[in-house]
Image (cartoon, rainbow, N blue to C red):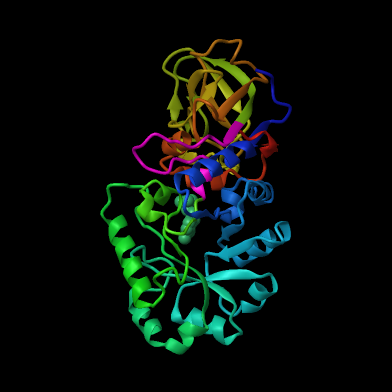
Amino acid sequence: MSDLEEPALLTIDLAAIVANYRLLAAQAPMAELAPAVKADAYGLGMAKVAPALAAAGARRFFVAWLAEGIALRALLPDAVIHVLNGLEPGRAGPYRAHRLIPCLDSLEAIREWVEGGGGPAVLHLDTGISRLGMPPEEWAALAKENGLRNRLELVLAMTHLACGDDAANPMNAAQRTAFLSAIDTLGLAGGRVPLSIAASSGIFLGPEYHLDLTRPGAALYGLPPLNGHPNPMRQVVRLQAKILQVRRVDSHMTVGYGATHRTTRPSRLATVSAGYADGLFRALGNRGHAYLGPVRVPVVGRVSMDLLTLDVTDAPPELARRGATIDLIGPHHSVDDLAGEAGTIGYEMLTALGRRYPRRYLDAGTAR
Ligand SMILES: *Cc1c(COP(=O)(O)O)cnc(C)c1O
């Protein structure tokens, strides 16, 4: 394995993202696939990821913030852009100026949008997640307010599953039923407005969840869509870092801040140039792992801001040497593996990776 030039390197495989786009599109062939690129494409860089997806055929995108929509508009002049956080209060002007479509989530937001001049909008209904979306007690009111509803220029109606990653959870079917009955109540059934339920996991719950449009994020970026099932997605991210120093220590030596690890045998320790400032959570202290080539090595002691320490006693010395490269996320250790060791999920791991790493993007042109 050739050594890194930089202290650490984040490699993002755009070809793998495009391959995942195609796999998801094939899984829900009757639905339009509209990628979620919020939070800087889950930390992977919207400026690279969104144009690669557009080149692969995506026409419509979801962001969370108005500001993300404005940034995406500059990248993709012709895309349809939906803002999941809805209409940020008092800011209808910039939505219109940048042709951004809010996912309206309350009667109040609908009034603000329509009375301020209207324009295309998404209706976001809350069917059980109690987070964003119009709550059920407002559906009937909207159904009765014919004037308001008729002035709404709806391009999509959507809801979001609370437990989509758990295929056996009865809440999925309950939310789907509630959504379709709300659509009926609102007079939007029968193809009058395109409908959407599925994010990444919903695509794998069966065709009855696909409807007209899917909005995956995580699966595009390689995360597993369903808990307890093999991951069909291609891995997108590799995170490598350099060994800065290897030391031999005796038995009973303590390692790192707080002396939370004590060696139980003469050991070799490798100090690596990545820490919690780089999204390697402190929770990985004494729990995380990395790979030195094919050899799994444990994190020992606490993770500090810029450094972490691995016990490489069991790795061959020719691998565990100053300047060698280790994989924190790589072929043997997925984002979700590392996230699991930190007691979190791949979503949080990806979005936390931070800005310090030099990044290498593998060209989408090589997509199969
Ligand atoms: C983030 C988000 C998505 C994408 O979800 P994934 O699980 O990453 O596929 C879709 N819809 C809504 C409302 C979201 O907030």
Location of the C terminus (image quadrant) = top right
Residue sitting at 41 percent across and 74 percent down?
Answer: 188
Which residue occupies the foreground of this view, 304 or 342?
Answer: 342
Image x and y of residue 62, in percent: 56, 59
Residue sitting at 56 percent across and 70 percent down?
Answer: 102
Q: Residue furthest left?
A: 170
Residue sitting at 54 percent across and 73 percent down?
Answer: 121
Image x and y of residue 10, in percent: 64, 36
Principal secondary structure, stretch drawn in magenta: loop
Image x and y of residue 84, in percent: 52, 64
Q: Quadrant of residue 287?
A: top left
Image x and y of residue 311, in percent: 50, 21
- Does residue 308 appear to the left or right of 364 in the view shown? left
Which residue occupies the foreground of this view, 209 or 171?
Answer: 209
- Using the image, determine if residue 314 lies above or below residue 287: above
Q: Quadrant of residue 367?
A: top right
Please tell me whether residue 249 belongs to the stretch shown in magenta.
no
- Using the image, determine if residue 49 lies above or below residue 319: below
Magenta-drawn segment:
217-239
Q: Residue furthest front?
A: 190
Asked if residue 164 can be seen in this view, the reply is no
Asked if residue 158 can be seen in this view, the reply is yes
The count of marks equals: 0
Which residue occupies the foreground of this view, 110 or 187?
Answer: 187
Residue sitting at 41 percent across and 17 percent down?
Answer: 264
Please tell me whether residue 233 belongs to the stretch shown in magenta.
yes
Location of the N terminus (image quadrant) = top right
